Amino acid sequence: MSKAEEWARKWSGPEEEASISRRIREFISPPPPAKQQIVGALYKIGAQINKLDYSLARLQSYDKMLFEKVVNSLVEGDKNKAAMYATEVAEVRKMARVIMTVRYSLERVKLRLETAVIFGDVQANLAPAIVALRQVTGYIKGMMPDVFAELVEVDENLQVALMQATTQAPIVLESTYVTEEAQKILRDASIVAEQRLKEAFPELPSFEKIAPSKAAAPGEEQPK
């Protein structure tokens, strides 16, 4: 790298340099129309929802196995082992809650994008979808990096679509309307996710209720 290039990098900074590079690329090879960008985003979001569903199915299967070990340990009177398995169950369900929240948030974002495509109301639906997408994408950055990378690309494509669709009066993503609509998307998704979580992952049994259920036979010592 020459001294001039190094000076330019320090002056502009990585974000501005990336922005300039993107504008040059778009000038040389213009991005597809806004509708096509949104349709492409819908396809990618659907693919990520499928990945999340697969991960949830695996977690549910693993949780079921651990759940049975908790119950069996309690029936055998081994509370220490039951507590160990219960701790692992809690970690699995913590992951499942995050993935499920992201999954149903993406479903709500997808619905907004479909509305924008069908009814052409891009300004009212696209900006809140982008803000909601950005927020939930951060939830799985370390958990599912492949999904994270795909959603970052979706966010970039939707930003381009938003700029193309609102050339007359650009929408500010930090506006009150956009923020409130984005929070509504996330709030509705969170409610659904909690309901689905309770259905898919039953509550662990109480240690006090199950442990004594194995009564000792006459002449045998009660297990501790």
Image (tube, grey):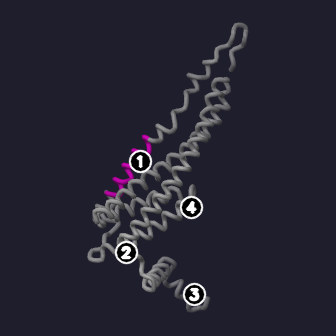
- Residue that mark 3 sits on: 6
Cα–Cα gap, marks 2 and 1: 32 Å
Q: Is residue 47 above or below residue 65?
A: below
Which label number is shown at residue 146? 4
Element type at marker 4?
A: helix
Ranked by sequence position, the earlier of labels 2 and 1 is 2
Q: Nearer the viewer, residue 224 or 94?
A: 94
Q: Is residue 18 magenta?
A: no
Contact, mark 2 vs mark 3 (Cβ under 8 Å): no
- Residue that mark 2 sits on: 33
Contact, mark 2 vs mark 1 (Cβ under 8 Å): no
Q: Residues within 10 Å of mark 4 (few under 14, many from 20)?
A: few
- Position of the C terminus by quadrant: top right
What residue do we see at 28% from left, 61% from top?
177
Question: Which amino acid lies under the numbered mark 4 shown in the image of this protein?
Answer: Asp
Question: Which amino acid lies under the numbered mark 2 shown in the image of this protein?
Answer: Pro
- Position of the N terminus by quadrant: bottom right
Question: Which amino acid lies under the numbered mark 1 shown in the image of this protein?
Answer: Ser
- Residue that mark 1 sits on: 190
Q: What segment is highlighted magenta in the picture?
A: 181-195
Left-right relation of 10 to 211: left
Cα–Cα gap, marks 4 and 1: 23 Å
Q: Nearer the viewer, mark 3 or mark 1?
A: 1
Contact, mark 3 vs mark 1 (Cβ under 8 Å): no
x, y percentage for residue 222? 68, 15
What residue do we see at 63% from left, 26% from top?
74
Left-right relation of 59 to 109: right
